[in-house]
Image (cartoon, coloured by chain):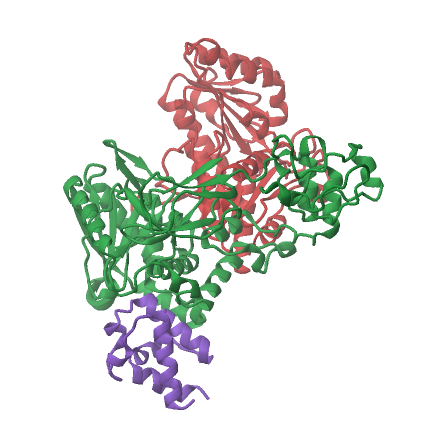
Chain colours: A red, B green, C purple
Amino acid sequence: MSTGTRARGTTYREAMREALREALRSDERVFLMGEDVGRYGGCFGVSLGLLEEFGPDRVRDTPLSESAFVGAGIGAALAGMRPVVEIMTVNFSLLALDQILNNAATLLHMSGGQLPVPLVIRMTTGAGRQLAAQHSHSLESFYAHIPGIRVLAPATLEDARHVLAPALADPDPVVIFEHGSLYNAAGELDPAAGPVELDRAAVRRPGTDVSLITYGGSLPKALAAADELAADGVDAEVVDLRSLRPLDGATIAASVARTHRAVVVDEAWRTGSLAAEVSARIAEESFYELDAPVERVCSAEVPIPYARQLEEAALPQTADIVAAAHRAVD
Amino acid sequence: MAEFTMPSLGADMDEGTLVEWLVAPGDPVRRGDPVAVVETAKSTIEVECFESGAMGRRLVEPGTTVPVGTPLALIEPAAEPREEPGEAGRPREEPRVPSASRRAAPAPAAGAGAGPAPAPAAGPAPPRAPAASGAPEHGAAEAGPLVRHLAERSGVDLGSVHGTGPAGRVTRADIERASAGAAPRSPRVRATPLARRLAAELGVGLSEVTGSGRDAAVRARDVSGAAARRSAAHPPQRPATAAARASRPPGEEAPGMRQAIARLMTRANRDIPHYYLSTTVDMTAATDWLHDHNRRAPLPERLLPAALLLRAAAVAAREVPELNGFWADDRFTPGEGVHLGVAVSLRGGGLVAPVLHRADTLDPHALMAALKDLVTRARTGRLRGSEVSGATITVTNLGDQGVETVFGVIHPPQVALVGFGRVVDRPWAVGGLLGVRPVVTVTLSADHRATDGAVGARYLSAVDRLLQKPEKL
Amino acid sequence: MNRADALNLVKESITQVVPDADLAALGPEDTFRDALEMDSLDFLSYLEILGERTGVRIDDADAPQLTTLSGSADFLAARVT
């Protein structure tokens, strides 16, 4: 490597932490709060060391009351702060859904544009770690349903590192979903990566035969499936939605226009899912491009089981994606 | 009742000559069917109608030249029950029993087409009654959804069914009676939306295509394959009926065509401030790919460089939409889709620029098939109305004439014209060394009112970039 | 196939592509592709017709030989049994 900006090894967790550190350093209005984010370093270790570095005013442990601390975050944002609120998992975020839907998402509208809520909420989502049915669900579609907020799902090291700054700069509430299986993902951070374009999906792998459209924790599975498909002579394109609201329909349509076949991979339950929304968009906008029915690969419609084999069986796996792609192409 | 009028087949057309009718009065016509042949100053064109119904009275005789917009014929609605008093055709003594009971009983066969009707009651009913009315009788317009569905499922043409319900309505029993004699209609072909679209664009009948998809569904590749085979099976030969056509013998330029080209080009040169850009593109990757493909492909599936060049031009037009559209009323309107005009020189002189619709969505194979078909028909005077207008950008390829560079004149109201020269071997610097490479000069003539040079430059670089990855085209 | 049959077949095939071609004015060694102003599509059609009528495989590399009447006739006479 000849340049001075050597790529360096990092993990998704560290990339997130580095983004928080940068935000806390560069803007004194920014502070982090949530359950166990301070002394314990975050339930998933994202904020480890930040309390020591920035002090208890800016890295605040909260009581176990999602509704209360998300509401406090909304108040702080209204008062001119730039709060980052961490919720342990999306399952628990339902306790704060009232604050998010009825306050954060609506105040700008109801105040005639006078009260923006520049709040960032981070939460863990997804299964795959034997945490059972109260810690493992993928409820991103609940949030993507709500006008007035932005919903993001960074799935790569670069997105983890560079999603927070534009999210904090956005005047509207932003919900960031971090898939639990991604925290330990390690690799070289591309030094050239810049801020994430919040409205844009990303084509992670170009291809010509079938579009694998996915997001979050399913991205690595889709990429692995694309590798397997390549060995079978099928050139798969992988689209990472990245922004779940708004959805980047143009990128989806452009991909389907190239490949004429779509497989939507979504760890959530099939019914009423983001996969359903994406499929509907393809039917609306790309009907005359389709050379096969849209395929969906989603979780089984059961509470995510605890037992490892059952959990694996319930979730979309690489082999399922490969099989769906073959159904679409063959 | 709709009028079928002399269409405008180009911005510069103000009159046309009706050459021939393709349908007779009374014939059913559907939206999109070619119904007449019209000769314009530039070419002879099959004109489609925009209404469905039945061909009505003709207002203009073949050989007549009329201004654009002149009604040529009337199109009658497909199926309207005639409400005139008397209704000579309908046996009014027909008892109005509920249709259900009629179904149960062996019907007294009062309907048209079911044979002579033994009159159930009083006076002798005229057998084959509708003929007496002197006009085709239809009940379809009044048929409800259930009846339509049944008719479709059982292969009955609603327009030919005599309705026995109230006000001549076609009933379920009528359909069941009619279907007893009708051959079941072949079921709707299973085809993907893309395949259906391609088939319409390439003029391929879906029922003639063997599907390779799940449950024998027809897929896009089946349609492109059929189109390629078809253009192989029908070499460019004038169909027998064409001999009778009033188009002039080949080898003579239509006298009007020169004037039409003259008018259009004068207007282009007067109104459009052209700017010109040129770049030379290394065609090594493209020609290697073509050779490799052509070595393996049977003759009908072989590709010419034109297929890749047109494909690149179309995709680049999608990438640089500022050049794909029209300048009118002092502003630019982007085209909806990339519709590539292709300049086709005619034997004996003259030029037409028929349109490859949605060319950016056709892969090189489909594009090649479409191009062969279009050029053949352009040269035999069998273009359709929808194929001679609506281009959003035009390509001229003078490579076959041995020319290396073409700086063309834009076809108003379009805002750009792309020129391809001949692919020639030239000394070419690669990585600091001199080698011999096949190269082609690509030019762009663009309307400076609509775009500036930087946009044009983006377009040419896109063409260059696309041609370096022929396998992705 | 004898050469006279081959030549006839060549002429018929050309006429299919260029209906008004004046073949009488064409010398056996004239490059008819240029003389008749056939473009690459026309020429490909001509090859397709030859291939279809004789069943002979024609490769791109054969094309240069097939641009004259005598070249085409020799080619067919040699390949078609």
**Above or below: residue C5 compared with residue B89:** below
Q: What x and y, as percent, mark residue A172?
A: 44, 20
The residue at the point 65 percent across, 43 percent down is B130
Give whichever of A268, B25 is nearer the camera.
B25
Give whichever of A212, A68 is nearer the camera.
A212
Q: Is residue B68 left or right of residue A293?
A: left
Q: Is residue A1 visible?
A: no
Q: What x and y, as percent, mark residue A318?
A: 60, 49
The residue at the point 59 percent across, 32 percent down is A125
The residue at the point 37 percent across, 50 percent down is B387
Q: Is residue B127 visible?
A: yes
Q: What x and y, as percent, mark residue B400?
A: 26, 65
Residue extending furthest right? B105
Q: Count the numbered circles shown.
A: 0
Q: What x and y, as percent, mark residue B301?
A: 44, 66
Which quadrant holds residue B239?
Answer: bottom left
> Which quadrant of the rendered structure holds the C terminus of chain B?
bottom left
**Above or below: residue B392 compared with residue B215:** above
Q: Is residue B203 left or right of residue C4?
A: right
Residue extending furthest bottom? C2
Q: Is residue B116 left or right of residue A89?
A: right
Give whichever of B354, B50 is nearer the camera.
B50
